[in-house]
Image (cartoon, rainbow, N blue to C red):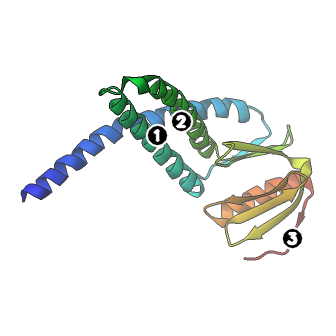
Amino acid sequence: MSKRSEKEARENADLVALLAPALAATALLSYFQYRALKKQFLSGAQVKRIDDLEAHTPILAISTLGIVFALWGLYAFAAWAFRGHAAFIPVAALAAYGVWLLIKRLLAAQAACLLGVVIDQEAGTLAFPTFFPALRTVPLEEIARLTREDGNKLHIAGEFGSYSLRFSDKRRRDECIYLLKSRTGSKMLAEME
C-alpha cells in the first residue's frame, strides 16, 4: 500500500470516528422525539398510521447531513475562535445557540418521518411529515379533492391549500385514499397513473 493511500485511509477512519458518535446521537435524539410524537398522535382508538420510511428518505438524509454540517461548522468556528481570536468567543457562543435551534428543528423533521402519515378519525385530522414545519396537520373536513398521480403520489387540496404526499408504493397510497374517502366524502379526480 502506498503512503498516499495509507494517509487517505487514516483520514477516512478519522472522519468516520468523528461522524459515528454524531450520527448515533442524532438517531437517539430523533427516537426520543418520535416517542413524544407517538404519545401525542397515536393515542386514540380511531387513529390509523401509515408508516413509510422509504418515502421520506430525502427528508431524513437532508436533516442528517444538516446536523452533521452544522456541528462540523460550529466545531471549526469554535476551534478558530479559541486559538487566539478571543474577541469572537461570544459570537461562538451565539453560534452554538443557533446551531442548537437548527438541530432541534432537524430532529423534529426526522421524528415526523418516523411517525409517518396519521389519520385520526375521532379528531378529524390528517398529519403528515414535511420539512418545515416538521409535521403538518390538516382538518379532514377541509379536504375537497384527492388526486392520484405517478403511481405513488397523492395530492390533497382544500381550504388549506394543496399538498403532495409521496408513498413508496401504491398499496400505502391507496390505503391512505381509502381512509380519507371514508371520512371526508371528498371527490377523487381523474387519475393520472
**Three-letter amino acid code of the residue under disc 2:** Ile
Q: Which mark is residue 189?
A: 3
Name the front one of labels 3 and 2.
Answer: 2
**Three-letter amino acid code of the residue under disc 1:** Ala
Label 2 Cα neighbours within 10 Å, binned few <14 / some 14-19 / many ≥20 = many
Left or right placement of residue 153 versus residue 27 in this view: right
**Three-letter amino acid code of the residue under disc 3:** Leu
Q: Quadrant of residue 114?
A: top right
Q: Quadrant of residue 189?
A: bottom right
Q: Which mark is residue 47?
A: none
In this view, the residue in front, 51 or 104, is 104
The residues tagged by marks 1 and 2 sit, at their Cα atoms, a distance apart of: 8 Å
The residues tagged by marks 1 and 3 sit, at their Cα atoms, a distance apart of: 43 Å
Q: Secondary structure at mark 2?
A: helix
Q: Are marks 1 and 2 in contact (CB under 8 Å)?
A: yes
Q: Secondary structure at mark 3?
A: loop
Q: Which comes before the other along the chain, label 1 or label 3?
A: 1
Q: Which residue is mark 1?
A: 70
Q: Which comes before the other along the chain, label 3 or label 2?
A: 2
Q: Quarter of the image containing the N terminus?
A: bottom left
The answer to whether residue 152 is seen in the rendering is yes
Name the front one of labels 1 and 2.
Answer: 1
Percent of width and height locating residue 181:
86, 57
Q: Which residue is mark 2?
A: 103
Q: Is residue 123 above or below residue 159?
A: above
Q: Quarter of the image containing the C terminus?
A: bottom right
Residue at figure coordinates x 53%, y 35% from the top left: 103
